[in-house]
Every structure is written in C-alpha cells, then in structure tokens.
C-alpha cells in the first residue's frame, strides 16, 4: 500500500494535510482548517477529493467542511461532536475503520482536548493523524477532558509502533521545546531542541514526528519521570501528567 501525504501551512500555525491513496487515486483532507487554502492545494495537485476526515469539532479543524464539501462533493467523516458546527455523512468512533481506496484507517479514541477527539491510524503505512492530542514535544490543552482521559489517550498513541510517523496539526514545537527544557535535563531532549530551533530559524517545519522520538523526549509522555522535579511525588501517572500539563499552562518562557 502507498499513501502520499501533502502537507502545507495554513492559518497562523495550522498544517493542512491532503492525502492520496496511490492505488485508487482517491484523496482526502484531514481536517479543514482553511477551506480556501485546501482547495488551492487541491488545484495544484490535481487530486480528486473523496473524503473529509475530521479529528474533532474545533473551528480550525472542521470550520471549512461545508465550503469544501460544496466545492468537491467529498463525504464528511468524523466523531459525533463535529455536528456542533457541521453536518456529518458518517459518524465514527473508537474501533471503526475508514477506507480511502485501498488504504484502511483505524479510528482511535483520543479524547481529552475535546471529549470526542479521534485519531486516524494507517497501520500498513505506519502513519497516524492525531489532530490536537499529541504534538511534537507537546500535547493539547484539556479544554473539555480530564487528566485521566488525556493520559489514557496519550498512552494509546504511545503504544503504536515506534516507527509510526505522526502528523499533528500545529507548529508549536519550538515553544514546546522551551518548556520541555525547563523541566527535563535529558541530553536527548537538549540535542533535539537544538535541531528544532535551527529548523525553525531556516523556516522548516518540525512536523511530522515519530512515536519513538516522542516517547524518548516528550515531557508529557515522560510525565511520571519528571513530576518529582515539580514537587509532585507518590501520585498516579495521570496525576503526574496533570502536574506537567499545569506547569506548561503557566509557563512564560
């Protein structure tokens, strides 16, 4: 199987993802942060859009659904919460599968940023589209969920094979690196942060990332190891995660 991913910046710090199943020629957009930008990239590629795959309901992820569907006829697929701002042609939840030609995506429940957030995992190509749950060196804010839910979601993603390529939806990595360095002195993180800062100076993206790299350096996946440095000891793993998330929410660096 072969899935081609076309990534491009849009809005202030989002990424758009157009994906194409090479066997069938069918394409999808993962979320719809900027309808005009997505339609322009479709024109450039000449791809035929069949699906809109929403990860969650926030306007910078589902706000372009109606305009893109009107222009392309693509079917909208996503969790039930997307109906807050847009219609759905197919509602999906944990354990469902979505097919784009010969590419099969497993739907994963990864709530916490929003309650119904999902990710799309293409095991054959070792690719996951994770929306705002996991970021390079970061994770999403808990606008709706609780720490135990978000921690469980991060652990589901961390359980994917280390070589899995992770497409997250925002270019937050330099800011995430500055926070990570404030709570973690691991040499692997320091080396990664140097590479990140240099890449951003050159105007290069830091997305995608990989599961193995995040397990090694992401402070939110390493929370049980880092919580003692924040004065938090003898707590459950999700409580350690909550302490690191709270530290990031108040971080001014």
Image (spheres, rainbow, N blue to C red):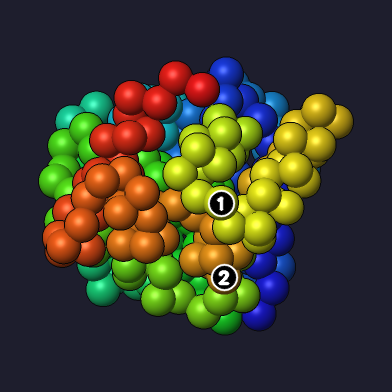
Going 56% across and 76% down the picture, which residue do you hit? 162
Residue 103 in which image quadrant: bottom right
Residue 144 in which image quadrant: top left
User: Which of the two residues, 125 or 74, is positioned nearer the viewer here?
Assistant: 125
Q: Earlier in the sequence, mark 1 or mark 2?
A: 1
User: Which of the two residues, 152 or 86, is positioned nearer the viewer here?
Assistant: 152
Assign a secondary structure to mark 2: helix
Q: Nearer the viewer, mark 1 or mark 2?
A: 1
- The answer, for residue 14, to whether it is visible in the render is yes
Relative to 245, is 51 on the left or the right?
Answer: right
Going 31% across and 62% down the picture, which residue do you hit? 224
* Other residues around mark 1 within 10 Å, as few (<14) / some (14–19) / many (≥20): few
Relative to 234, is 138 on the left or the right?
Answer: right
- Percent from the top left, x then y, of residue 210? 60, 63
- Percent from the top left, x then y, of residue 123? 51, 78
- Percent from the top left, x then y, of residue 145? 16, 43
Tag 1 residue: 185
Question: In whole angstroms, how far apart are the C-alphas of marks 1 and 2?
Answer: 18 Å
Which quarter of the figure is the N terminus placed in? Answer: bottom right
In the picture as drawn, the residue positioned furthest to the right comes out as: 202
Going 20% across and 57% down the picture, which residue do you hit? 233
- Percent from the top left, x then y, of residue 106? 38, 71
Assign a secondary structure to mark 1: loop
């Amino acid at each position: 199987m072969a899935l081609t991913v076309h990534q491009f910046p849009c809005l202030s710090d989002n990424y758009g993802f157009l994906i194409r199943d090479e066997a069938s020629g069918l394409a999808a957009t993962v979320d719809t942060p900027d309808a005009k930008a997505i339609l322009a990239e479709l024109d450039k590629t000449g791809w035929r859009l069949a699906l809109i795959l929403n990860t969650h309901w926030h306007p910078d992820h589902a706000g372009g659904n109606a305009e893109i569907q009107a222009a392309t006829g693509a079917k909208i697929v996503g969790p039930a919460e997307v109906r807050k701002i847009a219609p759905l042609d197919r509602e999906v939840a944990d354990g469902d599968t979505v097919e784009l030609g010969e590419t099969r995506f497993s739907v994963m429940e990864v709530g916490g940023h929003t309650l119904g957030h999902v990710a799309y995992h293409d095991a054959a190509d070792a690719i996951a589209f994770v929306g705002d749950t996991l970021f390079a060196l970061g994770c999403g804010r808990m606008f709706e969920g609780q720490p135990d839910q978000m921690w469980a979601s991060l652990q589901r993603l961390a359980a994917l094979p280390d070589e899995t390529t992770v497409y997250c939806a925002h270019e937050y990595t330099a800011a995430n690196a500055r926070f990570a360095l404030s709570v973690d002195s691991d040499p692997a993180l320091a080396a990664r942060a140097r590479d990140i800062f240099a890449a951003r100076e050159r105007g290069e993206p830091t997305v995608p990332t990989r599961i193995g790299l995040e397990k090694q350096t992401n402070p939110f996946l390493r929370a049980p190891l880092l919580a003692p440095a924040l004065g938090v000891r003898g707590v459950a793993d999700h409580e350690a995660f909550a302490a690191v998330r709270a530290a990031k929410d108040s971080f001014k660096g």
